[in-house]
Image (cartoon, coloured by chain):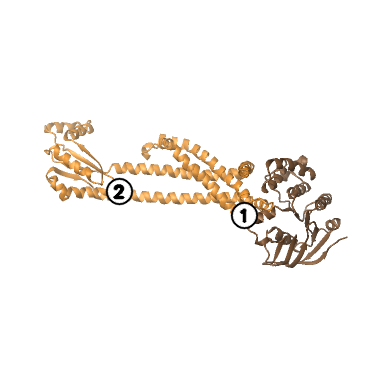
């Protein structure tokens, strides 16, 4: 216990007396942690953007005007039972009419033409969303399948809007974006780790003679290594606080100016996930510092 | 206490030690003299296991130093005090902390450290330099601090490698007197130096080295 206390005390004193070297190490670890925080926020932006795009993709089934509601609801029930389907929403002919009029409220000629017809020409629709964007083809095929035909779908469905080419291309773009972001994340994290490790190695390189002397006066490996590891943990701890502080004004700016463009308010996201981000950054920072110090000291501890 | 058994150390550029066989008994004050490159420092490094022999063995009492595991070596080093020409003090620690570190290394309590450190600093006339860092001390003061660190744990053996190499004659004399006093109290001393004046003033056993070989071993130097 006394040994542990001495190691911790020595780590803090070394950090304090390290001056510029400690400052440089904190700066580099802060940059590494900032990269990780930026990656977390970028992943959130990507996730929300892709979800917004995915949300805009659906299959809309347009029914013949005279089809009874019970038949539509029966098809809705069948569709909802399909494992690929996430949600089916039903819009009645009256609601379709109301929505149309709302959308074209300023288009007098269109509204006048609709009034001229006298009856509601707009059909009821079912809007189908799938769990995966690649599953829209399955829904389109289902509507043409025997089981759908058994429900009389051929007589009640006017047509289904489903653009295979656009959805397929979108699917490729989304999975490409996800793969690319994963790759960029891995590369950035590896680069940051290398930079952090090299910096901490340099700070320990400066103290290599000291390490040798400590060993010569009979200090155990842990007694020599411990304070360096504590110093590494302090680098991580301080860098965590600095990084999290830096990202407050950054996310405020993004929240104010980029919310529409990014489809997410980054400040709200940062604040609502602050504890998780804090935990990730703190653990990463301390682990980077401690492990880098542990490995760097090992080189000079041979005997 | 120390036994070199046909020790040879070869580097790429030649032999640093060439078939050395010597015995140093407990309580001796042995001066090892020779020009630069004669092999004095390599010899002392062998005792501390900072370097290992290419051939032969070095024994501390009955233990082959170079067969010790890391933990056992750490324990052995706690029985040896070391003093270097370039002092090798811990630059980020004060005079007090440098001594305290050596005591902490052997597991002394905070109370023992608080009581012994001021005492040993007083012995080497540094009690007014307690909170000074090494770079705030003169060469002589740094060497006295290094000696204080070397003796604080009452080692059985002190190895002093060119301890006066960077000092003026007055400080050199002081260091030699301190080492003699320590030896009078029963600690074995191995002093490596190229300074004949130092060896003369010690007036004890002298081992002369040249090109990695022992060319003379005078038991009672006058």
* Residue in view at x 57 percent, y 46 percent: A232
The chain containing the residue under callout 2 comes to A
Q: Which residue is mark 1?
A: A301
Would residue B205 appear left or right of A147 to someone viewing this image?
right
Instruction: Give how far apart the Cα atoms at labels 2 and 1 are.
Output: 56 Å
Task: Please indicate, yes or no, whether residue A180 appears anywhere in the rendered image.
Answer: yes
Q: Position of residue A295 (x, y in %)?
A: 56, 52
Q: Position of residue B90 (x, y in %)?
A: 69, 48
Q: Position of residue A195 (x, y in %)?
A: 53, 50
Classify the position of the N terminus of chain B by image quarter. Answer: bottom right
The nearer-to-camera label among 2 and 1 is 1
Q: Which residue is mark 2?
A: A170
* Residue in view at x 33 percent, y 48 percent: A174
Quarter where residue B60 is shown: bottom right
Q: Position of residue B204 (x, y in %)?
A: 84, 58
Other residues around mark 1 within 10 Å, as few (<14) / some (14–19) / many (≥20): some
Q: Earlier in the sequence, mark 2 or mark 1?
A: 2
Give the letter of the orange chain.
A
Task: Please indicate, yes or no, whether residue B90 appears anywhere in the rendered image.
Answer: no
Q: Secondary structure at mark 1?
A: loop
Chain B: drawing colour: brown
């Amino acid at each position: 216990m006394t040994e542990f206390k001495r190691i911790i005390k020595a780590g803090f004193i070394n950090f304090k007396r390290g001056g510029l070297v400690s400052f440089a190490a904190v700066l580099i670890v802060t940059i590494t942690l900032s990269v990780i925080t930026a990656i977390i926020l970028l992943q959130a932006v990507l996730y929300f953007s892709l979800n917004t795009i995915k949300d805009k993709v659906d299959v809309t089934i347009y029914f013949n005007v005279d089809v009874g509601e019970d038949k539509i609801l029966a098809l809705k029930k069948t569709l909802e039972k399909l494992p690929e389907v996430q949600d089916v929403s039903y819009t009645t002919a009256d609601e379709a009419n109301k929505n149309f009029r709302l959308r074209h409220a300023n288009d007098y000629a269109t509204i006048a033409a609709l009034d001229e017809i006298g009856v509601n020409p707009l059909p009821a629709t079912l809007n189908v969303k799938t769990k995966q964007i690649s599953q829209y083809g399955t829904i389109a095929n289902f509507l043409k399948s025997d089981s759908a035909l058994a429900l009389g779908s051929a007589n009640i469905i006017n047509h289904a809007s489903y653009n295979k080419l656009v959805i397929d291309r979108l699917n490729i773009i989304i999975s490409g974006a996800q793969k690319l972001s994963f790759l960029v994340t891995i590369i950035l994290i590896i680069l940051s780790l290398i930079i952090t490790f090299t910096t901490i190695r340099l700070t320990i390189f400066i103290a290599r003679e000291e390490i040798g002397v400590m060993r010569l006066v009979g200090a155990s490996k842990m007694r020599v290594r411990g304070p360096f590891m504590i110093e590494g943990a302090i680098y991580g701890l301080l860098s965590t606080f600095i990084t999290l502080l830096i990202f407050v004004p950054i996310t405020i700016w993004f929240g104010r100016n980029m919310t529409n463009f990014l489809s997410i308010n980054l400040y709200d996201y940062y604040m609502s996930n602050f504890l998780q981000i804090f935990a990730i950054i703190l653990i990463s920072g301390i682990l980077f510092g401690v492990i880098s110090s542990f490995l760097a000291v090992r080189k000079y501890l041979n005997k | 206490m120390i036994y070199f058994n046909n020790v040879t150390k070869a580097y790429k550029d030649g032999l640093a030690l060439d078939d050395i066989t010597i015995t140093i008994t407990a309580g001796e004050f042995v001066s090892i003299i020779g020009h630069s490159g004669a092999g004095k420092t390599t010899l002392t490094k062998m005792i501390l296991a900072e370097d290992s022999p290419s051939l032969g063995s070095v024994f501390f009492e009955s233990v082959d130093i170079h067969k010790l595991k890391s933990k056992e070596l750490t324990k052995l080093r706690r029985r040896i005090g070391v003093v270097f020409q370039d002092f090798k003090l811990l630059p980020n620690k004060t005079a007090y902390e440098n001594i305290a570190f050596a005591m902490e290394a052997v597991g002394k309590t905070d109370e023992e450290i608080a009581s012994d450190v001021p005492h040993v600093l007083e012995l080497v006339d540094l009690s007014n330099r307690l909170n000074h860092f090494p770079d705030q001390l003169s060469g002589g003061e740094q060497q006295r601090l290094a000696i204080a660190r070397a003796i604080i744990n009452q080692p059985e053996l002190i190895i002093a490698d060119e301890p006066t190499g960077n000092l003026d004659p007055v400080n050199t004399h002081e260091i030699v007197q301190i080492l003699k006093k320590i030896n009078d109290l029963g600690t074995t001393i191995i002093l490596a130096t190229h300074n004949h004046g130092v060896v003369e003033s010690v007036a004890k056993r002298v081992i002369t080295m040249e090109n990695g070989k022992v060319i003379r071993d005078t038991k009672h130097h006058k």
